[in-house]
């Protein structure tokens, strides 16, 4: 996903001289290297100085530029939080804060490198928009959107590398709208980001059991497609939310809130990271499982 | 690099800063608090920037930028913007009221205000970003900013300090309003290692000089005579509450407004100063 982000950004930067990227000491691999070589004035590496990364991006935007601030998710959002809030959101500037390697993807680096509550943190700030693409192709669409919109700040929550194609043949991506990757009528799985891969496995298993399953990429977490969620709740017998995020402030509680508001009658199950720090190491799947997120457990729970 | 070397009239500056102090004193009677000591501390600095250094787009030319990093000192900026016609008397009359748009800190979107500040340690990074944007567009705009000495305790300020010199930002002129006061006492006592400041900025790759922050001509000269190949930090030695005897170096005047008797005394002192 990070490579497709870099490629999409490079393409946009070729077209628009106002696009800048302010990075905090990331390795300039792939197209990021092309960007830095071809547009050195617009590739700004602040080093290990994330507060300044956000402040400089704000200053660029205040003069009409379209900057991206880019580093590992914990350091792009948590470390410079007040700058994100005051400089970007309060001033409502069209800056994209890219959180790379979100969730528990950095599965051997420990809790300091996990981003379990970023949707809640970013989503609580007025003016902030949030996009979390589910695969490289969706990342490209999201990056193009971020590079061309002037509405305000966006937190772009990315994975890392090696995410499979989840959206081939899906309906077109549209900011702020649910995207059905497949359509069914019995069960609807709402998800976003890298864990969409696991959600697809679960959808396959449920389909093998004879159920008609919808799989939805809720890529835009803010503004959330409330009407789309309502439609999903009304048109399916069972709705399952799967997200790589803490129980508070993410897609799961918002879906429950909407379900309450409309007095939904469908069954609703939610699966999230736990509200705790874990001290496990291993693969990404190992850490998700340690948080209770595995196809086996989810399938058992939704049966 | 152009630095706005206008002919500087120190006598005119003396009249202006006295006028601004009176205007701020007048507004102080509308509210209980307006950071009067902080505004008086940097009155000469902000006056020199607006009225002696900045180019204001005359004849379609360059329009320099001023960003009040120490947002709590913004009353002096408001007073100047009112005189320049950027803000109105009605704006000042409605200061900190439900019908007004001006508060105790500069707010983005208000006329003449380049950025929302107030939280300390944000301004210098934004100023660096603005300077980079102007450089990228091949414009000769200069970004001016005023920091408090308290802001120099924020790590983010030192990040931005490193960035400005590392990125070769030449179109940035910063001042630190070095009144040696913060809420809980004298900076020189709470943070003895805070000093020296000029040497710190020199070590960070800036051009830096120290001036009397209430000597308008000296402030102007410090910028007009800069070499211009590095960002400039002018360390302006100032007195908090400058100009009013009972306010000078008394921490309570960081925030509160004078009562009626105090107002009359302050007015007399300002009139006697001319």
Image (spheres, helix red, strand yellow):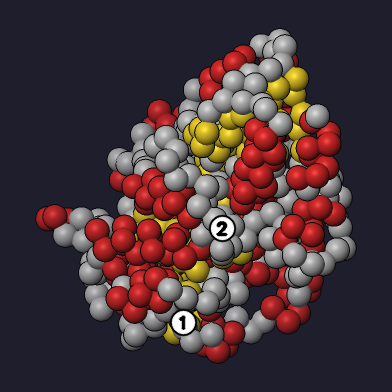
Q: Which residue corresponds to the image point at 37% horizontal and 50% vertical from the top-left?
A: A144
Task: Give how far apart the Cα atoms at labels 1 and 2 are.
Answer: 36 Å
- Give A200 or A4, whichever is nearer the viewer: A200
Instruction: Using a 10 Å C-alpha cutoff, classify the residue at mark 2 as few (fewer than 14 neighbours), some (14 to 19) or many (20 or more).
Output: some
Q: Is residue A100 above or below residue B172?
A: above
Q: Position of residue B176 (x, y in %)?
A: 54, 69
When asked about the image quadrant of residue A108, the answer is: bottom right
The residue wearing badge 2 is A163
Q: Find residue A11 and report its horizontal and vertical position in percent.
A: 31, 61
Position of the N terminus of chain B by quadrant: bottom left
Residue placed furthest toward the left: B59
Q: Which residue is mark 1?
A: B166
Percent position (x, y) of residue A34? 35, 75
Q: Chain of mark 1?
A: B
Q: Residue at x 37, y 59 (%)?
A: A8
Is residue A199 among the parts visible in the rendering? no
């Amino acid at each position: 996903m990070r490579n497709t982000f870099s490629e999409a950004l490079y393409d946009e930067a070729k077209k628009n001289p106002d696009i800048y990227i302010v990075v905090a000491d990331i390795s300039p691999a792939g197209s990021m290297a092309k960007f830095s070589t071809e547009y050195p004035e617009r590739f700004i590496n602040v080093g290990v100085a994330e507060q300044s990364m956000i402040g400089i991006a704000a200053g660029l935007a205040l003069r009409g530029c379209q900057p991206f601030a880019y580093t590992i998710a914990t350091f792009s959002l948590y470390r410079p939080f007040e700058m994100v809030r005051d400089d970007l959101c309060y001033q409502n500037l069209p800056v994209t804060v890219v959180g790379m390697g979100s969730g528990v993807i950095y599965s051997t680096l420990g809790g300091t490198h996990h981003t379990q509550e970023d949707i809640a943190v970013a989503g609580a700030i007025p003016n902030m928009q949030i996009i979390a693409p589910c695969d490289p192709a969706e990342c490209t669409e999201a990056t193009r959107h971020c590079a061309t919109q002037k509405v305000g700040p966006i937190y772009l929550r990315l994975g890392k590398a090696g995410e499979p194609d989840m959206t081939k043949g899906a309906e077109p991506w549209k900011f702020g709208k649910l995207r059905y990757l497949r359509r069914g009528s019995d069960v609807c799985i709402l998800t976003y980001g890298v864990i969409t891969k696991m959600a697809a496995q679960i959808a396959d298993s449920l389909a093998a059991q004879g159920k008609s399953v919808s799989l939805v990429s809720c890529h835009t977490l803010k503004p959330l497609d409330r009407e789309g969620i309502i439609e999903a709740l009304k048109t399916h017998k069972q709705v399952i939310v799967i997200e790589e995020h803490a129980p508070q402030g993410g897609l799961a509680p918002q879906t429950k809130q909407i379900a309450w508001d409309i007095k939904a009658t469908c069954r609703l199950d939610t699966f999230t990271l736990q509200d705790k720090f874990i001290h496990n190491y291993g693969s990404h799947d190992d850490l998700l499982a340690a948080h209770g997120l595995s196809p086996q457990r989810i399938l058992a729970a939704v049966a | 690099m152009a630095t706005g070397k206008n002919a500087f009239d120190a006598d005119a500056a003396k009249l202006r800063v006295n006028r601004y102090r009176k205007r701020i004193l007048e507004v102080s009677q509308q509210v209980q608090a307006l950071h009067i000591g902080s505004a008086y501390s940097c009155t000469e600095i902000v006056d020199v920037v607006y009225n002696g250094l900045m180019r204001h787009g005359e004849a379609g030319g360059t329009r320099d930028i001023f960003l009040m990093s120490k947002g709590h000192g913004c009353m002096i900026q408001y007073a100047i913007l009112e005189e320049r016609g950027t803000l109105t008397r009605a704006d000042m009359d409605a200061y900190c009221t439900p019908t007004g748009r001006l508060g105790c800190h500069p707010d983005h979107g208000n006329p003449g205000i380049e950025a929302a500040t107030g939280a300390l340690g944000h301004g210098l990074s934004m100023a660096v970003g603005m300077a980079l944007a102007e450089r990228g567009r091949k414009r000769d705009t200069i970004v001016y900013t005023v920091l408090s000495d308290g802001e120099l305790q924020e790590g983010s300020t030192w990040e931005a300090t490193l960035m400005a010199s590392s990125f070769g930002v030449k179109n940035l002129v910063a001042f630190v309003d070095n009144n040696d006061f913060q809420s809980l006492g004298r900076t020189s006592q709470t943070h003895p290692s805070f000093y020296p400041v000029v040497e710190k900025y020199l070590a960070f790759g800036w051009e830096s000089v120290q001036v009397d922050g209430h000597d308008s001509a000296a402030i102007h000269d410090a910028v007009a005579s800069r070499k211009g190949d590095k960002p400039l930090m002018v360390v302006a030695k100032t007195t908090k509450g400058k100009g009013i005897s009972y306010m000078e170096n008394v921490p309570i005047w960081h925030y509160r407004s004078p009562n009626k008797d105090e107002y009359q005394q302050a007015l007399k002192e300002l009139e006697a100063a001319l």
